[in-house]
Image (tube, rainbow, N blue to C red):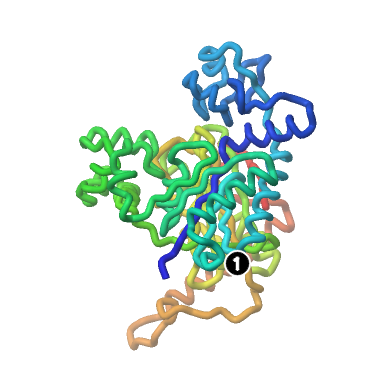
């Protein structure tokens, strides 16, 4: 059976949720109908645009730009401060409703998720009819609108939901790629940031179709692994599963907001190592191992992306978490300046549970070989335990790895 994936995305979430609350309480106007933004401070004219209304967009205002610029474009612009507690409440209500339809939900941010429709398809006349019903039910129950993209994989569903907005349902199946996606500017492709687009345009690649028909080896030469991924995305290739997690699922994570945007992988590495060490230490303290690792990136324009990987063998080793996180960052990062980095772990198991080794973890005796893998693993465990003991006794700042002295460039954003 062919998979059917929905991508459900709230239209201008922060502004919509603020507007719904204003209408419900009578304490403000419906910002969706006037030039308005969420973010910044009207008196100081500081901050950036976190969300905008459709009328504000008509003035050329875009998400992530400085508020002072937005006010120059539209002097009568109405501004409202962000209310993250409110956003969490509306997000939770929507996700609870979607979980009542199927457990196969992967929430990727506060205002968007993937839904694997395959298992409930028999309940509806068609995927499009189901998407329209879900979209309309969300509007009826909660007062805000969503876009729903439909396809056979997550990438194409995500691309479809970004077509015409608001309050729309779009399909983008593989046989529709050439007609619907290939004519679009290359910058519209998921994960194609400004830096990548600039490189592609220098190579004479201006549309997604031209990217799809390019030599992937040439793209890898100029954009490394990100170039190969963009080529795959331009051809609609994505086999990643919808990774559903129960609402009550527990995980361990940590993130950090950077005092200065990082622009190189070399800058990201020590920060990821610091985060991995923090997460691994908390796992060991809880006597847990993680079966899934996820890296989150928030860019300078406040767009947030994440990528996760299921591990062959659950771990609470700093070194293992760091290597996995670095790999995920390498494949996820689109060369744009990064404002926040995070590592999350899930699918936790008790440390005392027996571990199922993969074939590649097993060591076979050889007359001339010593068991270097097991020795290194044991040394890493002893090192992690020693560091845990020192920090427990003298505090978290009692000892630092030399590579982490860069930590003074960023400040912790939070743990979960």
Residue visible at 67% across and 44% down in the picture: 140
Quarter-of-image position of residue 336: top left
* Residue 402 visible in the current orientation: no
Where 109 falls versus 327 (above or below)? above
- In the displayed orientation, state which residue is furthest to the front: 125
- The quadrant of the image that shows the N terminus is bottom left
Local crowd size for mark 1, using a 10 Å CA cut-off: few (<14), some (14–19), many (≥20):
some
Where in the figure is residue 321, as x and y percent of width and height?
52, 60
Q: How many marks?
A: 1
In screen coordinates, is 81 left or right of 163?
Answer: right
Residue visible at 44% across and 64% down in the picture: 3
Where in the figure is residue 291, as x and y percent of width and height?
56, 68
Quarter-of-image position of residue 290: bottom right
Where in the figure is residue 347, as x and y percent of width and height?
60, 67
Residue visible at 26% across and 34% down in the picture: 201
Q: Secondary structure at mark 1?
A: strand
In screen coordinates, is 360 left or right of 289?
Answer: left
Where 43 falls versus 24 (above or below)? above
Where in the figure is residue 413, as x and y percent of width and height?
64, 42
Is 160 or 409 nearer to us in this picture? 160
Q: Which residue is mark 1?
A: 347
* Residue 47 visible in the current orientation: yes
Residue visible at 42% across and 50% down in the picture: 171
Is 177 or 129 nearer to us in this picture? 129
Where 397 falls versus 353 (above or below)? above
Is 200 or 331 nearer to us in this picture? 200
């Amino acid at each position: 059976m062919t998979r059917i994936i929905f991508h459900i995305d709230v239209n201008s979430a922060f502004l919509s949720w603020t507007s719904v609350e204003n209408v419900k309480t009578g304490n403000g106007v419906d910002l969706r109908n006037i030039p308005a933004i969420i973010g910044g401070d009207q008196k100081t004219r500081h901050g950036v645009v976190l969300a905008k209304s459709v009328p504000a967009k008509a003035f050329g205002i875009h998400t992530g730009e400085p508020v002072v610029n937005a006010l120059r474009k539209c002097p009568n612009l109405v501004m409202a401060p962000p209310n993250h507690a409110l956003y969490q409440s509306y997000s939770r209500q929507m996700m609870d409703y979607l979980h009542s339809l199927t457990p196969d939900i992967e929430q990727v941010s506060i205002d968007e998720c993937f839904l694997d429709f395959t298992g409930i398809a028999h309940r509806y006349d068609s995927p499009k009819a189901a998407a329209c019903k879900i979209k309309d039910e969300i509007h009826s129950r909660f007062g805000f609108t969503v876009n729903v993209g439909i396809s056979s994989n997550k990438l194409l569903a995500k691309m479809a939901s970004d077509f015409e907005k608001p309050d729309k349902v779009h399909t983008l199946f593989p046989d529709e790629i050439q007609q619907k996606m290939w004519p679009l500017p290359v910058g519209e492709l998921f994960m194609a940031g400004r830096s990548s687009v600039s490189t592609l345009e220098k190579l004479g690649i201006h549309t997604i179709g031209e990217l799809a028909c390019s030599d992937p080896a040439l793209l890898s030469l100029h954009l490394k692994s990100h170039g190969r991924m963009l080529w795959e995305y331009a051809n609609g290739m994505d086999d990643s599963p919808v990774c559903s997690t129960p609402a009550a699922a527990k995980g361990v994570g940590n993130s950090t907001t950077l005092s200065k945007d990082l622009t190189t992988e070399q800058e990201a590495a020590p920060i990821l190592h610091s985060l991995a060490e923090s997460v691994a230490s908390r796992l060991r303290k809880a006597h847990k191992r993680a079966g899934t690792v996820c890296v989150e990136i928030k860019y300078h324009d406040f767009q947030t992306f994440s990528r996760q990987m299921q591990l062959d063998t659950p771990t609470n080793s700093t070194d293992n978490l760091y290597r996995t996180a670095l790999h995920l960052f390498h494949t996820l990062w689109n060369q744009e300046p990064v404002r926040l980095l995070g590592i999350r772990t899930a699918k936790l198991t008790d440390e005392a549970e027996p571990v199922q080794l993969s074939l590649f973890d097993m060591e076979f005796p050889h007359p001339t070989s010593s068991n270097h893998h097991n020795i290194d693993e044991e040394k890493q465990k002893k090192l992690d335990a020693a560091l845990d003991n020192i920090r427990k006794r003298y505090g978290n700042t009692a000892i630092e790895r030399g590579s982490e002295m860069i930590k003074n460039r960023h400040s912790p954003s939070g743990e979960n």
